[in-house]
DNA sequence: ATACTACTTACAGTTGCTGTAAGGTAAATT
DNA sequence: AATTTACCTTACAGCAACTGTAAGTAGTAT
């Protein structure tokens, strides 16, 4: 089921948007706590965030920036101000699309559908900077290079990308990739880490997997 | 170097757009033969096509459809008619973004930049209607379903999609998939055709591969 | 110097894909 | 209706790639 979070302060408009998406079979959640909507959105783990840019309290821009910095949900911005600068600012912040409100429900659905198609859910792609990984095929893409990783390599990299820039502990990797963290030789992790590094190296990504001795690993993709 | 093709009949506007992109360091080509721009675009192999929807001769919609059916370039539509229907139609045809002209150059650049970013040049995806196939991983996507085909299945489907809606002969399939059309038992083609059909059936695509007795096969994806 | 952690390489079991073969079904031709 | 031709289906075994095990090496901290 595809989940959509709606962040909109105008109650009437929010209900209308929610209804529009519900009619199409989406699972919709209206976010009501405009002072700190971050927690609600993180709890929900939506496939798409529809965000009004003119919110009380924290501005929509700030929220957009915050979400983009630590989540991978695509964001569709709603704005009443038909200003070019607003759009450019939001693009700079990493928003994925725009709509000037009020807008036709079909238009909203079309844009949302396209975002869901190209990003989340349907395509199952996670991104870190310019690096993107298809979690179905484990196809890794960077600029004009690409490479198909094996299943184990892909699962490891997926965990690293999802937690980036935080580190991922040995336990998390063992349970994330092999299902349990007990009765497993840690060597298996090291072996596959070597294999992943070799694969990454062959597409010019030497040294992006860092070892944190005694703790785990993390990704270093700041300078791509 | 990132190549952009501009298909625009208004000479003044075309020059302005070309200049806008050139200033940013893109390699731009204005397409001048509006009667048959397909060949020019194929020859150019651009990373992005900027397409005016109101062209003389063949309409922009048709060109968009044609390009989407056999290329993987992202397409940015320019339209003077600020009509919702146009947008929806074009979205249905597989266009990737829209702009109402006249528009601010920065806005055009921002949108184009985003398309180039998300499509990241080499994605190697071919599309037929709502069906899309990644030719690196043979991941087939339709709406919210997806499936990873085997190499042989994927190669066959790729040929069928690339030639769609025309038929593909036995010879073309044999040489396209196995490299040569001689000394090969035609049975191998039939076996893998069965396997492909079974895979397609398991994601709800029964009966889209048609047999043309004595000639070959073709795809029937009109009603997706 | 020693212990501990992390890395590397080789090897063998397993899995899934592929082509071969053989037999069955459907359509055209006589 | 019988026969021929084209096409479809299923089972089987070889092969390639991925995976975990094992053993040994390199690096780091105490």
Image (spheres, coloured by chain):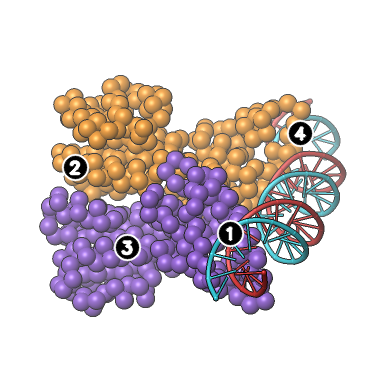
Chain colours: A purple, B orange, C red, D cyan
The answer to whether the residues at label 2 and label 4 have Cβ atoms under 8 Å apart is no
Q: Secondary structure at mark 1?
A: helix
Q: Secondary structure at mark 3?
A: helix
Cα separation, mark 4 vs mark 1, equals: 43 Å
**Mark 4, residue position:** B185
Chain bearing tag 2 is: B
Which circle, 2 or 4, is nearer the viewer?
A: 2
Q: Secondary structure at mark 4?
A: loop
Residue A69 is tagged as: 3
Residue at position x 35%, y 73% from top? A42
Q: Which of the two labelled residues, at mark 1 and mark 3, occupies the earlier sequence position?
A: 3
Is residue B64 left or right of B183 when viewed as pictured? left
Residue at position x 18%, y 39% from top? B105
**Mark 1, residue position:** A193
Which circle, 2 or 3, is nearer the viewer?
A: 3
**Mark 2, residue position:** B106
| Foreground of the two, B99 or A83 | A83
Cα separation, mark 2 vs mark 1, equals: 44 Å
**Could you confirm whether marks 2 and 4 are on the same chain?**
yes
Residue at position x 21%, y 69% from top? A8
Give residue A70's quadrant in the image.
bottom left
Mark 2 neighbour class, 10 Å CA radius: few under 14, some 14 to 19, many 20 or more:
some
Mark 4 neighbour class, 10 Å CA radius: few under 14, some 14 to 19, many 20 or more:
few
Cα separation, mark 1 vs mark 3, equals: 26 Å
Instruction: Reply above or below: B28 against D29.
Output: above
């Amino acid at each position: 089921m595809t989940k959509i979070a709606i962040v909109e302060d105008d109650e009437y408009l929010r209900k209308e948007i929610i209804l529009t998406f519900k009619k199409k079979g989406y699972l919709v959640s209206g976010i009501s706590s405009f002072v700190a909507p971050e927690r609600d959105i993180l709890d929900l783990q939506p496939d798409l965030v529809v965000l009004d840019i003119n919110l009380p309290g924290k501005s929509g821009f700030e929220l957009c920036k915050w979400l983009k910095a630590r989540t991978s949900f695509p964001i569709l911005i709603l704005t009443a101000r038909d200003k070019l600068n607003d759009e450019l600012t939001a693009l700079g912040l990493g928003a994925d699309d725009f709509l000037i409100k009020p807008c036709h429900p079909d238009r909203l659905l079309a844009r949302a559908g396209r975002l869901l198609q190209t990003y989340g859910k349907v395509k199952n792609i996670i991104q870190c900077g310019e690096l993107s990984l298809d979690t179905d095929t484990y196809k890794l893409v960077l600029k004009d290079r690409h490479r198909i990783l094996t299943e184990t390599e892909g699962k490891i990299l997926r965990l690293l990308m999802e937690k980036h820039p935080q580190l991922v502990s040995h336990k998390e990797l063992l349970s994330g990739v092999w299902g349990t963290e007990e009765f497993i030789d840690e060597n298996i992790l090291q072996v596959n880490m070597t294999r992943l590094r070799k694969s990454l190296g062959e597409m010019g990504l030497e040294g992006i997997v860092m070892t944190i001795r005694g703790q785990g690993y993390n990704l270093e993709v700041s300078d791509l």
